[in-house]
């Protein structure tokens, strides 16, 4: 067996002389399919796939256009991250999961990546210790030599930072590792900076703002979503008031759009991702700002589906008047009010909900409305449910027990009211006043109910 492995290793070394190949020998992955998967923006793609031989020897090829961050994926779903670099890579180990067993025999950038992956966490732990000592020193009134100790603490922190900075500065120029490692450090440092090193928040936000989001290297990093999430999460968690958070986020949005105007494809992909991120965190002040700014931008073309989402923020923003609509199709009215259209409702406030029986979240949200409806009604809040169902039996079974008005014309997304309100997802909720002015775009029934409690219940 040792002779076979030795022969395999010699063969591996010979193969490793070939450019733009990954050659590996991992006995525990013998006879397994091995894939080489790389990052491209928010997605991944498979470059090459092969079956390791009975000794775990495999060979994968890649082109110079693939250079960047990738990972090897074995048939048993274990993986190992690598940097594709020119002139090829040579690896050996037991398996991809046992990182300690893996040796990088060829691949200078991967060796640097491995070295930093070992050393940087150690330096971060040392910094955390110094930070803790600094906080303890400032809070402890027993000792009298605070200044002396603080100087020693600052000196220790600076020594670690200088050591880390020198490593990054001395990376080979124009290598992918010299781009990737500082980027990864920036992203990974965000939680610590938000909690313990708040003095670094302005510089960190500035670093995110000054990034080139059109850079192919960023798209090849596998960190694109992390960069966006970390950027806006840090602003959200920087100790500012909500109004100040929106101001800072909108400044960052300006930077990103200005940078991305040079590449419409990336503009659409990145801004759509950001838009969904802001909505998912109920940061509606900035999602509205993003939508209106992009729609008003004359220098770019927006994908049709995405443009429809954005248009809802321009047309249906708070303060605008919502379209009136006729109660067409089937009408379920438990109070038999004989109302013909939305404006016939004689209430101070109207909640319009778009949903359907086939929407899992709608069942939960509409049941919640039914449970709080009597409270809302007692404070002059009416509810109208506009269904996007296509079959009468589904609509009626779904809405028959709702204590509020429900309507459906069975045209789904082609329903005129759905189009007039620029609905692109279910459930979608609007709070209107008696003049149909948009008061709020709640992201959930919980938020809507909180509004009722704050402004109507407690307000009285």
Image: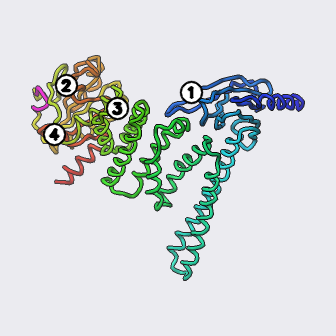
Q: Which residue is disc 1 drawn over? A: 45
Q: Which residue is disc 3 drawn over? A: 300
Tell me the CA gap for discs 2 and 4. Answer: 25 Å
Q: Earlier in the sequence, mark 1 or mark 2?
A: 1
Q: Earlier in the sequence, mark 4 or mark 3?
A: 3
Q: Which residue is disc 2 drawn over? A: 332
Residue 389 percent location from the top left of the image? 29, 21
Residue 271 percent location from the top left of the image? 39, 36
Q: Which residues are magenta?
A: 339-344
Residue at the image position 38 percent from the left and 44 percent from the top? 281
Q: Which quadrant: the N terminus?
A: top right
Residue 128 percent location from the top left of the image? 58, 61
Tell me the CA gap for discs 4 and 3. Answer: 31 Å
Residue 403 percent location from the top left of the image? 21, 32
Tell me the CA gap for discs 3 and 2. Answer: 45 Å
Tell me the CA gap for discs 1 and 2. Answer: 50 Å
Tell me the CA gap for discs 1 and 4. Answer: 47 Å
Q: Earlier in the sequence, mark 1 or mark 4?
A: 1
Q: Secondary structure at mark 2?
A: strand
> Does the stretch in magenta take in 27?
no
Q: Secondary structure at mark 1?
A: strand
Quadrant housing residue 82: top right
Q: Nearer the viewer, mark 1 or mark 2?
A: 1
Q: Nearer the viewer, mark 1 or mark 4?
A: 1
Q: Which mark is residue 437?
A: 4
Q: Earlier in the sequence, mark 2 or mark 4?
A: 2
- Residue furthest toward the right? 3
Q: Earlier in the sequence, mark 3 or mark 2?
A: 3
Q: Give the answer, above or below, for where 154 lies relative to 213.
A: below
Quadrant housing residue 368: top left
């Amino acid at each position: 067996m040792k002779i076979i492995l030795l022969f395999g290793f010699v063969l591996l070394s010979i193969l490793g002389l070939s450019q733009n190949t990954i050659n590996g020998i991992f006995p525990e992955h013998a006879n397994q399919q091995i894939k080489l998967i790389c990052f491209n923006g928010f997605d991944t793609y498979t470059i090459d796939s092969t079956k390791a031989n009975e000794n775990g020897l495999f060979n994968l090829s890649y082109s110079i256009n693939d250079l960047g961050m990738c990972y090897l994926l074995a048939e048993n779903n274990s993986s190992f991250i690598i940097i594709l670099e020119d002139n090829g890579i040579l690896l050996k180990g037991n398996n991809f999961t046992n990182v300690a067993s893996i040796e990088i025999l060829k691949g200078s950038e991967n060796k640097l990546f491995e070295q930093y992956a070992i050393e940087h966490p150690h330096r971060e732990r040392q910094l955390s210790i110094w930070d803790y000592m600094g906080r303890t020193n400032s809070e402890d009134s027993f000792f009298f030599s605070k200044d002396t100790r603080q100087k020693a603490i600052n000196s220790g922190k600076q020594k670690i930072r200088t050591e880390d900075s020198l490593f990054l500065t001395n990376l080979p120029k124009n290598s992918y590792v010299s781009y990737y490692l500082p980027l990864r450090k920036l992203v990974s440092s965000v939680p610590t900076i938000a909690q313990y090193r708040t003095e670094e928040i302005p510089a960190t936000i500035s670093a995110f703002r000054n990034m080139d989001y059109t850079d192919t290297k960023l798209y090849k990093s596998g960190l694109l979503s992390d960069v966006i999430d970390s950027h806006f999460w840090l602003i959200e968690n920087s100790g500012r008031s909500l109004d100040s958070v929106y101001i800072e986020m909108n400044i960052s949005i300006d930077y990103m759009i200005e940078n991305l105007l040079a590449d419409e494809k990336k503009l659409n992909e990145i801004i759509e991702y950001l838009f969904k991120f802001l909505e998912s965190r109920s940061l509606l002040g900035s999602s509205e700002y993003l939508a209106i700014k992009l729609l008003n931008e004359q220098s770019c073309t927006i994908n049709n589906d995405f443009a429809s989402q954005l248009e809802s923020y321009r047309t249906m923003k708070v303060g605008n008047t919502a379209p009136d609509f006729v109660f067409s199709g089937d009408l379920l009215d438990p109070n038999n009010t004989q109302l013909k259209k939305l404006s016939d409702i004689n209430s101070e406030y109207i909640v319009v909900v778009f949903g359907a029986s086939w929407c899992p979240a709608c069942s939960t949200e509409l049941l919640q409305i039914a449970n709080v409806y009597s409270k809302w009604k007692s404070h002059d809040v009416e509810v109208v449910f506009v269904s996007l169902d296509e079959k009468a039996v589904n609509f009626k079974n779904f809405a028959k027990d709702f204590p509020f008005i429900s309507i459906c014309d069975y045209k789904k997304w082609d329903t005129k009211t759905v189009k007039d309100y620029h609905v692109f997802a279910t459930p979608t909720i609007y709070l209107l006043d008696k003049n149909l002015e948009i008061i709020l775009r709640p992201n959930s029934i919980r938020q809507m109910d909180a509004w009722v409690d704050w402004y109507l219940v407690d307000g009285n």
